[in-house]
Amino acid sequence: MPSAPQSPNTARPEGEPSIRSGHITEYTFRAISAWPVLATCLALVLAGAWLFYLAGHPPILSPALPVVGIACFLLTFFLLKGLIILQPNEAAVCLLFGKYKGTLTQAGFCWLNPFYTRQKLSLRLKTQETGPLKVNDAVGNPVEIGAVIIWRVAQAARATLEVDNYGLYVSAQSETALRLLASRHPYDPTEQQDAQPTTGTGVPAPADALSSITLRDGSDVLASILLQELQLRMAPVGIDVVEARISHLAYAPEIAGAMLRKQAASAVIAARRVITQGAVSIIDDALADLEGRMGHQLEPQQRAAMISNLLVVLIGDREATPTVNTGL
């Protein structure tokens, strides 16, 4: 029968370090093969049957034979209770009268102390889809955001004994981390100047606390931030988050049309700004070339008149320039 340490100070097998979290110290132990135990159970069944046979056939008449036969059957049932089959990437948390005794991760057909209470759980990778959730971004605009999280149980005892239901815990913490991420960043770069960062209590934070990352353009960085936040939340209960990715991001339907028009207007303003800057650069080059040819600088009134005429030629012809309907 496998033995388990009774306290965290007991020596552990090499390569199996203890990991403390709260009141649970997780460690693993190895069980013995079930095949010798199964052979013993078969032998006990045959022995019990033979004893019952002898008890019913004279001249061998002994009142102790049926008692020994019954004891053989009871011992067989007791030993069979300790049999357990574990698949790869599966664990069994063992308790003895309510006290944690160890975690079995040895795959195969094994035998444990029949008095152990065993709870199986999978160590395979799981995919958790969170959202889409409706959240207010750093500016206060309602947005819809969703994420896909890949996680696994890394410490079976902590996942089983630290929380009542580790699956619900992962769902709740994933939603909380995703909402927190969306509330810390503006949706669009054009709205960064309007964003007002706040602390967890709702008090405005210092101006330099606002990140330059936006929800729309910072997918890789946001995924890394979300992954670190989830790992910090899941580690105390033995959950390992492998990957986290933003899977859905959009404005809420009630403001989607207005925000699209705002983005179109911002694009038109940016385009006109580039055109104006280019026109000013062309005028400066033209005046510098003209003054070089004339050999002297122009009078301020002459420069002003020429700049006005050139601006009219370059950007003032509204009929020749196609206008963009922004819908405003």
Image (cartoon, rainbow, N blue to C red):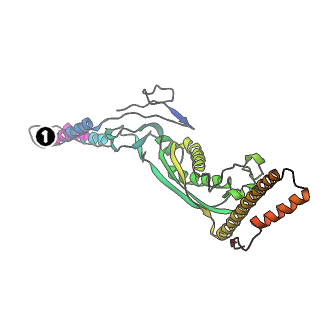
Could you tell me what secondary structure mostly forms the magenta stretch?
helix
- In the image, 257: left or right of 284? left
Residue 69's quadrant in the figure? Answer: top left
Residue displayed at 17% across by 43% down: 49
Residue 272 coordinates in the image, percent (x, y): 73, 63
Front in this rendered view, residue 6 or 174? 174
What residue did someone put label 1 on? 54
Q: Is residue 114 visible?
A: yes
Which residues, given as a range, are shown in magenta? 46-72
Task: Give the residue type that dot 1 points to.
Answer: Leu
Of the pair 241 and 64, the residue shown nearer to us: 241
Q: Residue furthest front?
A: 294
Which quadrant would the N terminus be assigned to in this image? top left
Q: How many C-alpha atoms fall within 10 Å of the one at disc 1: few (<14), some, or many (≥20)?
A: some
Q: Quadrant of the C terminus?
A: bottom right
Residue 139 visible in image: no
**Residue 95 x, y percent position in the rendering:** 44, 40
